[in-house]
């Protein structure tokens, strides 16, 4: 698994994460999928904490047909074409 991306068919087990710079996309032990900046401030969350259901993008396709990337601007995007995003792009000024 790449440090900042997942390919279709790959998963994030509880406690596992991918990251790019200050941005960490983690499947927490409570089953909430969260994007953090500097490991302290949540920018986006799936809202699945405390449930048995694991978050799913619901994008169909074969193995390696899509990839989820934690971008350096703070946005997490699923690409085949851009099919889904957290819409959490951070401006350079907000990082300081």
Image: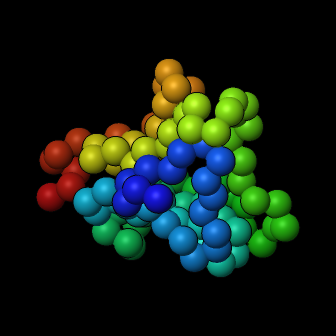
Relative to residue 9, is residue 82 drawn left or right?
left
User: Could you tell me residue 91's position as x and y percent?
Assistant: 23, 42
Most distant residue in the front direction: 63
Q: How many marks?
A: 0
Q: Is residue 6 above or below residue 12?
A: above
Relative to residue 95, is residue 89 drawn left or right?
right
Relative to residue 48, is residue 69 drawn left or right?
left
User: Could you tell me residue 20's position as x and y percent?
Assistant: 31, 56
Residue at image position (58%, 31%) is 65
Most distant residue in the right direction: 52
Most distant residue in the top direction: 81
Residue at image position (65%, 78%) is 29
Q: Is residue 12 above or below residue 5?
A: below
User: Could you tell me residue 6's position as x and y percent?
Assistant: 51, 50
85 or 96: which is nearer to us? 85
Relative to residue 53, is residue 79 drawn left or right?
left
The C terminus: image quadrant = bottom left
Residue at image position (52%, 26%) is 80
């Amino acid at each position: 698994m790449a440090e900042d991306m997942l390919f279709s068919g790959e998963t994030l087990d509880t406690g596992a994460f991918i990251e790019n710079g200050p941005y960490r996309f983690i499947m927490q032990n409570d089953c909430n999928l969260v994007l953090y900046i500097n490991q302290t401030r949540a920018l986006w969350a799936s809202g699945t904490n405390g449930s048995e259901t694991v978050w799913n993008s619901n994008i169909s396709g074969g193995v390696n047909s899509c990839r989820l990337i934690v971008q350096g601007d703070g946005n997490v995007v699923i690409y085949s074409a851009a099919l889904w995003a957290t819409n959490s792009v951070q401006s350079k000024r907000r990082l300081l």
